[in-house]
Amino acid sequence: MSMVADPSWNVMPVANPDVAARERDKLIRRAVLKDPMELAEPAYQLQDREKIVVPSTLDRLSRELLLRAQRAIVVALNAGAAIEPDGVVPEGALLRHEWEIAVGLRDISDLRAEHGLNAAASVGPMTEAVLKSQEGALFQAQDAIAARVAELERYADSLNAAETAYRDWQDALRVSDLNPRYLDLVARTAADEHAVTEISGLTERAATAQAFQEAVQRVGLAAVALELR
């Protein structure tokens, strides 16, 4: 999807993960090509409503939330593939979260648009009281989805940190293989006991390995929060 003035339009269509992969790909490709962008108001989706959520049906707040979720899922999938820690959330579960978030946001967008029309036409206190309670329900639903998106982001951040720690650990293992040469250099050039001790400390690989393991444990804790939803 091309860049537009409002970055929330860079959100991608979301297909129902229960639909066969081939049909999902077809639905997404068609939506990317044909779904209109930069609409003033969200459109109501009539076609394939149970199979795909298209960006034109979402208002700006909803597009922004869905885009955050999609970015977090991409980060999580990329980092998870690089290190494959135990307890990682499967791709299918992440796609299920994406679909449920997208459907919820489409429903909120539909009702928020209808609520705006009803509020503009309201003429009495009883109607306004009903509208106020409906507005509260919309805020509550929006906050619940925002919290879910934040959990996805926390999980993605944990995986990203674990990947960074893993690469650091691997680099430490690689460069520590050169330690004997450094020790030999120090021993030959100056019998400085302090320098020898300092260089010998580089062989302590456990610290980097522990940092990686701690990062992986944080991934597990973040994954549990998603699995409980």
Image (cartoon, rainbow, N blue to C red):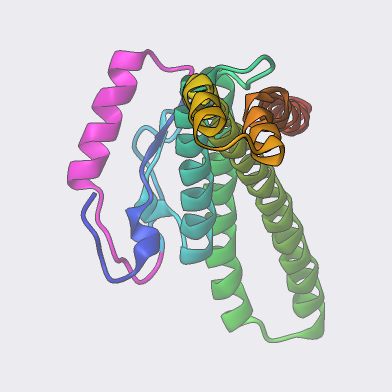
For the point 66% across and 53% down, the residue is 146
Q: Where is residue 216 in the image (x, y as percent from the top left)?
A: 69, 26
Image coordinates of residue 151 in percent, x first then y, are 69, 43
Within the image, what quadrant is residue 193 found in? top right
Residue 225: x and y in percent read 77, 33
Left or right: residue 112 versus residue 79 is: right
Residue occupying the far left of the picture: 33
Q: Residue at x 54, y 33 (%)?
A: 186
Q: Quadrant of the C terminus?
A: top right
Quadrant of res 209: top right
x and y percentages locating residue 122 in the rendered image: 65, 82
Q: Give the range drawn in magenta.
A: 17-41
Above or below: residue 37 compared with residue 207: below
Q: Is residue 144 on the magenta stretch?
A: no
Instruction: Identify the residue at image location x=25%, y=48%.
Output: 35
Looking at the image, which residue is at 47% across and 62% down?
A: 59
Asked if 98 appears above or below 174 in the picture, the reply is below
Q: In which quarter of the image is residue 124?
A: bottom right
Please count the marks in the image.
0
Answer whether residue 40 is magenta in the image.
yes
Q: Left or right: 71 with respect to 114?
A: left
Residue closer to the observer: 166 or 105 = 166
